[in-house]
Image: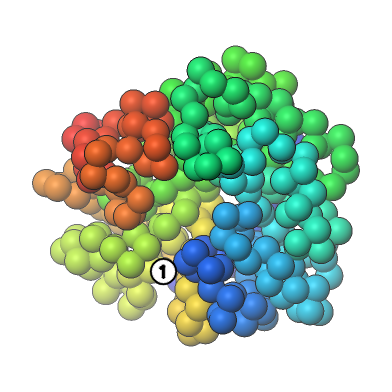
Amino acid sequence: MSLPVPSFTLNNGVKIPGVGKGCWLGPDGGKDVALTMCKNALQVGYRHIDTAAGYANEELVGQAVRESGIPRSEIFVTTKIWVRNGHRVRAAFEDSLKALDIEYIDLYLVHWPMTHAADGTPRSFDEEPNFITVWKDMEKLLDTGKVRAIGVSNFSVQNLELLLKHATVVPAVNQVEAHPCLPQVELQTFCQEKGILLSAYSPLGQGNALFFEDADFVKVVEAHNATPAQIAISWLVQRGIAPIVKSANLERMKLNITLVELSAAEMDTIGAVHKKPNMHRSLLPYHATDGTVFGWTYKQLGWPMAHGGLVPSL
């Protein structure tokens, strides 16, 4: 049985579509495909487009929205502040708003908890600007009337707890890597308690979907005559997590927002995949060989990982 894409209500009452179209297409922003991809996504039914200053394609995303023929009020656009802009939050926001040229931004996220100096050197938390000072400047953006909600990305329980001690506004969203190999159960529970919606980037493993080959996962896929992507996306949505899915292929785009109704037993089956040997792990390539991500250690990030992104504890 197929289901319509639901919406989730953020902690300030703003509604966000339950499945978004991701726009990370490589260092050059995928300039040869980004515009067409976003236009196609909007035409087949996506109403949430997720980009970032660091993706280098905000202009193309904005062009797709403007040229779609769909009322602006029906499209939800997320973008993010990059790590080098922690000292100029308002200016970075204005840069993104100008690049998008879509009147306002629906959701603006702190892309990563670390900040970098202009030369790319990562700062420790003890140096300013840190994510607390960045967040205080993010809160001020709400007074502009040009952003509907603010949130964070890649924040752990550890760093959310620290942030919330100083925040006046609770983040509306925390966008993190999440999929059957990394279900983020503890983080989701914490976020739900605080009124923060968990959103999932790379829900299909960014081309490294280890769980696609799992025998139990395959049985669920076959039972519904669905694609592995449909099952993974549907599993997240039924958990109350909003996935951000990337595909430039028109047919896959259509299938990815054709959700499947999973039984409680099937939900449990997929939820247990990560408990199998060597399955509980990050599937993304940004883990450096020295055990850092963009200059921060797993300890600083609050991620219970070892080298290579393997998560040894459940």
Q: Residue at image x 82%, y 54%? A: 104
Q: Residue at x 84, y 47 (%)?
A: 146
Q: Residue furthest front?
A: 119
Q: Position of residue 154 (x, y in %)?
A: 48, 40
Q: Residue at x 47, y 25 (%)?
A: 124
Q: Name the residue nearer the viewer: 253 or 306.
A: 306
Q: Quadrant of residue 127?
A: top right
Q: Amino acid at mark 1?
A: Gln
Residue 181 image offset from top left, x and y in percent: 28, 50
Q: Residues within 10 Å of mark 1 (few under 14, many from 20)?
A: many
Reply above or below: 67 against 73. Answer: below
Residue lying farthest to the left in this orientation: 277
Q: Residue 124, relative to residue 251: is it above or below?
A: above
Quick check: 252 above or below 54?
Answer: below
- Residue where numbered disc 1 is placed: 230
Relative to residue 145, is residue 114 depicted above or below?
above
